[in-house]
Image (spheres, rainbow, N blue to C red):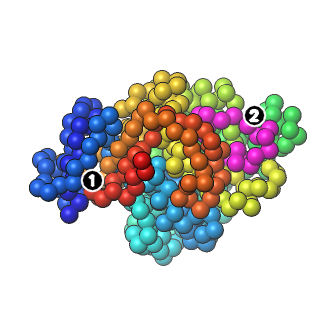
Amino acid sequence: MNNLLIRNGRVIDPANNIDEVRDLFVTDGKIAESPAPNAEIIDATNLVITPGLIDIHVHLREPGQEHKETIATGTRAAAAGGFTTVVAMPNTTPPTDTPERLTWVLKQAAATGFVHVFSTAALTTGLAGKEIAPIEAMAAAGAIALTDDGQCVQNLKLMRDVVLRAKKVGLLIMDHCQEASLTAGSIMHEGEWSDRLGLTGWPSLAEEIIVARNIMLAEEIGHPIHCQHISSGTSIRLIREARARGIPISGEASPHHITLTDENLKSGDASFKVNPPLRTQEDIDEIIGGIADGTITILASDHAPHGLSEKQQPLDRAPFGMLGLETELAVFLTTLVHQKKAISLPKLIALLTINPARLLHIDAGTLSPGSVADITLIDPNLHWTYDRETSPSLSRNTPYHGYQFQGRAVRTIVSGKTVWELKK
């Protein structure tokens, strides 16, 4: 029956401005105003009870790259990180660029996923940036947003046409901001450490030019564009100024871009190779400042699993990307709340719940009575060490192996059912 009585926890529900110690009731898989008879009792003393966490930037690799991840293993990793909803990117093999392929992903997620899965659809056919994909048909088939994530449309007229068509169907554009001519052959951030290591540098300008383009398109067309995994301090300043003028532009920050720098690449470990690349401490400071002042409204992992043999190659041949779902909450709690004290715990929860839900217009991110009982229980003070060998993911490409964190999810509840619980 999925009836629960969760007792004595600190309920943080930013959607309803709730932050208080109280009980939470679940009846038939939905949030209730009173307890149901014969409900399972969960003692949440010293724990935080939040709406189920949402990650809008996840690579699940299925279909076509199942040696890296499947929908089942990726959503199991999401549950272990406290996430009850994830949004899948379309750069699978083949890409999610037709309504038939989108339908397949959604059906597979319903059959094998441990958490709720929404799927984006491609902006262009084959993610090639040359021909607009059948946006209207994919919107009708259930696409939650449009993106060529992993690629960036370079042709300005084509991108403008894409935004105009996205506006007609009411779907958000999510853009991977990368000017390709500036990054050909690039391995890491262009700066002191790329010079020292003799590796081709990736200038911040390559991101900033596309962010500026997206701001102008969003302003002209009046349709929201979301800039994914911002890595540059200048990008933060551009977005801040645009939002102050009321332009419908937004941005997200990922865990690695607020904790790791380009100096980490001196180890030669390709776990630190990511797109966009790790940048400087100055960029980190600007991104954290943008999170603190509300310029950045979304936090997301960019969970990007790769096989062990792929990531064991030299830096110039290894693929870009790292795992993120299991450690994401812990990184943000440890860095933003405990160490930097940049934001409060309720603000962090908003960045991971109601903010992404509102951006994508999905019915989630709240503990309002009648809503689906997606719930995350968090111990914000638990000290623990991450061991990648215990991961439910099929891949192990994480830079956080052996890191010590403060805070983590201890139970994940989807539609009133516990789908993951920390072993004691």
Res. 263 mark: 2
Where's the N terminus, which quadrant?
bottom left
Q: How many numbered marks, from 0 up? A: 2
C-alpha distance separating marks 1 and 2: 43 Å
Residue sticking out furthest to the front: 424
Which residue is nearer to you in this view: 358 or 47? 47
Point out which mark residue 373 bears. Answer: 1
Name the residue: 41% across, 62% down: 114
Residue appearing at x 47%, y 59% in the figure: 76
How far across and how far down the image is residue 209, in percent? 66, 40
At label 2, which amino acid type do we have?
A: Glu
Tell me if residue 250 is in the magenta stretch.
Answer: no
Q: Secondary structure beneath disc 2?
A: helix
Give the vertical position of 88 relative to 50 (above or below): below
Q: Residues within 10 Å of mark 2 (few under 14, many from 20)?
A: many
Residue 268 part of the magenta segment: yes
- Image coordinates for residue 169, horizontal then vertical, percent: 41, 60
Above or below — where is 71 with respect to 374?
Answer: below
Residue 370 relative to residue 68: left or right = left
Q: Is residue 99 visible?
A: no
Which mark identifies residue 60? none
Residue 309, percent from left and from top: 74, 61
Q: Secondary structure under badge 1?
A: loop
The magenta segment is: 256-276
Viewer-proximal residue among 153 and 388: 388
Q: Name the residue type under label 1.
A: Ala
What residue is shown at x 80% (from left), y 44% (from top)? 268
| Residue shown at 14% from the left, 46% from the top | 33
Q: Could you tell me if residue 319 is visible in this image?
A: yes
